[in-house]
Amino acid sequence: MEASVASDPFRQMVNLWWLWVLTGVAWIVVALVVLQFDQASITTVGVLIGIMFLSAGVQNLLFGSLAGGAAKWILWIFGVLFLIAGVISLIHPENTFAGVADILGFLFLCVGVFWLVQAFAERDTNDLWWFGLIAGISLIILAFWTSGQFFIHKQYTLLVFAGIWALFHGVGDIMRGFQIRKLKTLV
């Protein structure tokens, strides 16, 4: 009986609740750093985007290795895609900025939809699932708003929204970590 409990991915994730809190704090630090730039260069924005993609990729791969079933594969697929985007972003940061500025609305739409789906998937186990719902709706609204911006304004818009994205991600991870910790007492 003990061996099956130790191999259960859900129990492993419950025991590692602090990883969610730690990654949430890291995302909030990234948000604070990103939001400190007043007039960032195009290269700086491209590098920051690359680092954010790499961080999201590593986080998804790590949590995917702890998850089971379909969640494992979804996290791994997104993790690999984020890592590829991060490497490409760091190789050509100027092109990254131009490309991301052009598709900023689409990126926010994808992330917002992912957060909405995640919020509804966690509704039964996470009392704070509504935060993911609010964050997802907010990003979808930002997606439509940023689609109409001109290129000059997109540099600053992109930097501010990258900071907001990191902040939402960090707060959501911290909340999720403490919800998982709460489940630990129930399991």
Image (cartoon, rainbow, N blue to C red):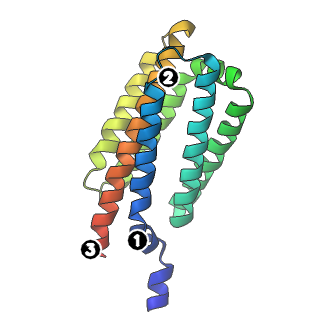
Q: Secondary structure at mark 1?
A: helix
User: 36 or 165: which is nearer to us?
Assistant: 36
Q: Secondary structure at mark 2?
A: helix
Quadrant holding the N terminus: bottom left
* Residue at the spot 68% in from the left edge and 31% down from the top edge: 89
Q: CA distance from mark 1 to mark 3?
A: 12 Å
* Location of mark 3 (residue): 186
Q: CA distance from mark 3 to mark 2?
A: 41 Å
Q: Which mark is residue 159?
A: 2
Q: Is residue 120 visible?
A: no
Query: Residue 153: percent from the left, percent from the top?
Result: 50, 9
How packed mark 2 is, by other alpha carbons closer than 10 Å (few <14, some 14-19, many 20 or more), is many
* Location of mark 1 (residue): 15
**Of label 3 and label 2, which has the lower sequence position?**
2
For discs 1 and 3, the disc positioned in front in the rendered view: 1
How packed mark 1 is, by other alpha carbons closer than 10 Å (few <14, some 14-19, many 20 or more), is some
Query: Residue 87: percent from the left, percent from the top?
Result: 70, 38
Q: Secondary structure at mark 3?
A: helix
* Residue at the spot 35% in from the left edge and 51% down from the top edge: 174
Amino acid of disc 3: Leu
Q: Which mark is residue 38?
A: none
**Of label 2 and label 1, which has the lower sequence position?**
1
User: 33 or 174: which is nearer to us?
Assistant: 33
Query: Residue 163: percent from the left, percent from the top?
Result: 44, 30
Quadrant holding the C terminus: bottom left
Amino acid of disc 2: Leu
Q: Are marks 3 and 2 in contact (CB under 8 Å)?
A: no
